[in-house]
Image: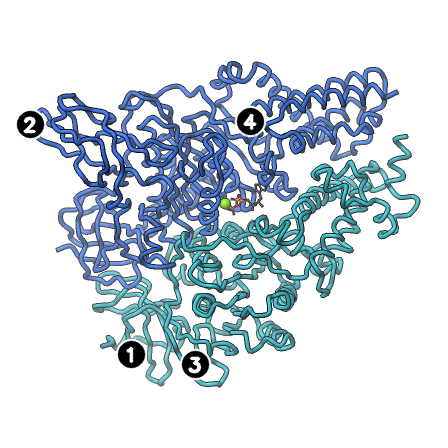
Amino acid sequence: MNLQYIGLKEINGPLIFLDNVKGIGFEEVVEIRLDNGTVRHGRVVEINGDLVAILVFEGTRDLSLTNTVIKFKGKPMEMGLSKNVLGRVFNGIGNPIDNLGPVYVDEYKDINGEPLNPVSRLYPKNYINTGISSIDGLTTLIRGQKLPIFSGSGMPHNDLAVQIVKQAKLSGEKNEKFAIVFAAMGVTNDVANYFRRSFEEAGVLDNVVMFLNLSNDPIIERLLTPRCALTTAEYLAYKHDMHILVVMTDITAYCEALREFSSSKGEIPGRKGYPGYLYSDLASLFERAGIIKTAKGSVTQIPILTMPNDDITHPIPDLTGYITEGQIVLDRDLHQQGIYPPIGVLPSLSRLMKDGIGAGYTRDDHQALMNQIFASYARVMDARSLASVIGEDELSPADKSYIQFGKQFEKHFISQGYVNREIKDTLDLGWKLLSIFPREELDRTDELILEEHYNHDAAVGAFELDKKSFIKELNKEEI
Amino acid sequence: MNEVYSINGPVIKVKNAKGFKIMEKVFVGKQKLLGEVISISDNFTVIQVYESTTGLQRGEKVYSSGEAISAVLGPGLLGNIFDGIQRPLHTIFENSGAYIKPGTNIPCLDMEKQWDVTFKVSVGEHIRFGQIFAVIQETSLIEHRLLVPKNVSGEIVTVKPNGAYKMEDILIQVKDSNNQLHDLTMVQKWPIKEPRPISKRLPLTIPLVSGQRVIDTLFPIAKGGSAAVPGGFGTGKTMMQHQFAKWCDADIIVYIGCGERGNEMTQTLDEFSELIDPKSNKPLIERTVLIANTSNMPVAAREASIYTGVTIAEYYRDMGYHVALMADSTSRWAEALREISGRLEEMPAEEGFPAYLPSRISQFYERAGYVDTLSERSGSVSIVGAISPQGADFSEPVTQNTKRFVRAFWALDKELAYARHYAAINWNLSYSEYINDLSKWYNKNISTEFLEARQKFITILAEENKLMEIVKLIGKDVLPDDQKLVLEIARVIRVGYLQQNAFHKDDTFVPLEKQLKMMKLILYLERVSQQVLKEGKAFSLLLRTNMFEKVIKVKYEVPNDNLDLFEDYYKMIDEAFSAIK
Ligand SMILES: Nc1ncnc2c1ncn2[C@@H]1O[C@H](COP(=O)(O)OP(=O)(O)OP(=O)(O)O)[C@@H](O)[C@H]1O
Ligand SMILES: [Mg+2]
């Protein structure tokens, strides 16, 4: 009993309008059949009396007022799901494109999801070992967290995402089921292939579901891509108790599609032309990470976004940061110095780590180490900006010790390449680096913890701080 | 018949509608979605719907209710968690699983539950609106005082015996001057956008003590006052609100998560159920009402959540309690206003916000106050509102307009947060206008030394600020020794005093007595250091005594319940300094 209409009243950008329509639900899906036999998909975005506005995901190219038949499906957009989606590749609106035929469907799910009741959530506490010091040590990833990578064009966010996926997989417990849902929005074929190849190399391809809306695919389709991906992730996590890592890239392209849709609808634009509801819209994606009490699985999200002009106050990173549970910020300076991964640790943050680290999780001294590194590294920045004014030679001995620490910290702790580091090694390395300082400088740390972990001589040896070392100089001056 | 004519997200229109009133509660469509009438014109009545409108069709019916959107007030609020339109989230979870479905219509409070009622009135007495007629032990911490609802006054004609009753059982009957009988139960409704009346406002002279040093010492808030916490993402707004909710000396906490994260509400719920209040030895949840309208829940209900929360707060105030309300984040509420306004195609003012944004903000903060209630007790509502400015830029409309209506402003700073200096309150940008009104209280209840020490701290920090301008250009080394000392003492104040670790068992809450002792110790260190310098000894010698580090770590080394240990520090300093030769 699907309703069917022939012809359109108006076409405007990605929107088409129908007149004299009855019995249509808001946000219902429609199928648009062109007279050449091709089929497109759309969604009701506004009802005004008899007039209905429909957003066409594949775009309105080639449509005329007379060459279409519109079929209303009587339900919101759904995704057909079963365990067989694992290993499959879909386009941006959830149709298979890997020539393996249709997917057997066990259950249809509304891709918009419904808001999770906070009472049904389980607060995430289990940390995921990524093997990357600046993440495990300073911005620990927690299972069920949404932790985006803030990057910029030309920086290695894809490599980092792949490294996290590969290494996190290794640390999972043996009998736990693990899968990856990958959503590409507006990225190039190369990027999509890079991810595919990397999953293949890691031997996980059978456990990956890919949704691809590439840069040459219809832009408006992108509005559905993350929703299809997240619906799939939730299904696998909550129906089949799997631990799902969702990688979504590039959120910036998604937001641009939303902006295009909004302006075609004639909505009042907010900052930089993005609609005023960008925050709520992004939240409807990111809030779908988590763990619920009624299932064993989890959905962890690693969205990737490229900050236009590396500007963290741009509405996309800004609103994302207000929703996600922290962020990993890539730093162009570090990148240009050849440091990989170029993680800017100061603006990076993991809000969930406090309950997932420490005794019983990582190690009892983790919190203390982290606080001290952040405090000390922040002072490195002050010392550097002073040095850029008065010259490094003119710095006080204390400031020199910060310059020295900063150098070694970036060289040994942040820069680690593609090595997989144990958490214990990360923490030990952290203390060794802090031991570069005279003990008094470590003003954030309990004496007891310093007693156990502070070893200045070891640091002098390890980092080859020579005789002219600033510390000696410091002592000399004061004696 | 009233039917849906147009649908645009949460905004629907009814053409040629009859019988609706402005701000009336309505039910929309087959699913009976909750909505509110927001404008009426010749042709169209506009309704904002508090639930998802997906699937709603043109032509579905819209039903009047005859009343405004109201909060349901009665025992069972405490310890509970509701969404923005006061639907009980525990019950929804038990009934329908992990997700919240639209059209979920269940009573806000558990109507079947029996409560032990003790009556405070007897037949023949006269009673009026706002007076207490019976009490119930709602939680082991809080006695719920049943108040006579609006429009009821007269002579009591029947009173049930003390005992267990259900929510809707008639407890007493009152005959008014027209000989009309009113049945009073445990529950009453109150329109959420209407402030509950009071007898009179009182001056704000008592601080709301939070145990957070930078607040209590530098920028205190009064009981009945209001404060704003603006800050970019990750600077610590939510942590600050949680710290307040956990430790502040109010009787009741209303915590509103408005358009923020689901996990934060889960965390609050878990943590508050486990955390024991040091004063009463009971779980904190027993004095707390949680309202969760997370960012992925319908936008219009975000707007309602703020009003629902403040109405519940006023209700407990009217029983004679001190209530502290946390709203995280008021920006999301303002954005909800903006979104609805945009869909109504209203003329936008600044940055797309409607022209009535300032008046809405002021109406909300005006509901704070320290008052004499209609029941002749005193109570208060204090409001702490978080603000999430776009791009952490405080010149945006929500921050600017809020600043006009609150008297304490705690500006969170990205740089401090990056250095993990928490609470990341920037002492140069923040202020409290309450300090003068509270000075008497501090002098009388703590010591006159408290505010003196505070003033000295402020002076030192200001001086540091000035010196840092020079240091940025030429470095610290060239400063004379006395200025080096200023910088060093300022560092002790910043790291040892202002910075406070919410995750440390002793440092998370610090009583005023300890705050004073810490300040005095730091100022003592300054004084004796100055003396040593006057004797012509080098500043570097002072540093080598390590006393500055020792004093910085006092916060961790001296537990809150053993303040005598401070004496040891004075001795230690004296010995160390007299050893300087
Ligand atoms: N007083 C504190 N003590 C220790 N850590 C803190 C403190 N305040 C904030 N933090 C740290 O900063 C993180 C971010 O704080 P919070 O979640 O309160 O930020 P926010 O300002 O509410 O951000 P958003 O606007 O994105 O919600 C916390 O997860 C915690 O790690
Ligand atoms: Mg917050």
Q: Does the residue labelled 1 lie within 8 Å of ligand 1?
A: no
Q: What residue type is labelled 4?
A: Pro
Tag 3–tag 1 contact (CB < 8 Å): no
Instruction: For mark 1, give the secondary structure.
Output: strand
Tell me which chain the residue with mark 3 is part of. Answer: A
Task: Tell me the quarter of the picture where residue B305 sits.
Answer: top left
Point out the residue furthest to the right here. A467
Question: Visible in this render: residue A274?
Answer: no
Instruction: For mark 3, give the secondary structure.
Output: loop
Quickly name the residue at label 1. A69
**Could you give the CA–CA distance between mark 3 and mark 1, rounded to whole angstroms?**
27 Å
Q: Which chain is cyan in the rendering?
A: A
Q: Chain B is drawn in which colour?
A: blue
Q: Which amino acid does label 2 sit on?
A: Asn
Establish if A451 lies above or below B153: below
Question: Measuring 33% from the left and 54% from the top, which residue is drawn there?
Answer: B92
Label 4 crowd bin: few (<14), some (14–19), many (20+), radius 10 Å: some
Label 1 crowd bin: few (<14), some (14–19), many (20+), radius 10 Å: some
Image side of residue B89 versus residue A409, left or right: left
Coordinates of residue B240 in the picture (x, y in percent): 52, 38
Tag 4–tag 3 contact (CB < 8 Å): no
Tell me which chain the residue with mark 4 is part of. Answer: B
Quickly name the residue at label 3. A103
Establish if B456 lies above or below B151: above
Q: Which amino acid does label 1 sit on?
A: Val
**Could you give the CA–CA distance between mark 2 and mark 4, rounded to whole angstroms?**
55 Å
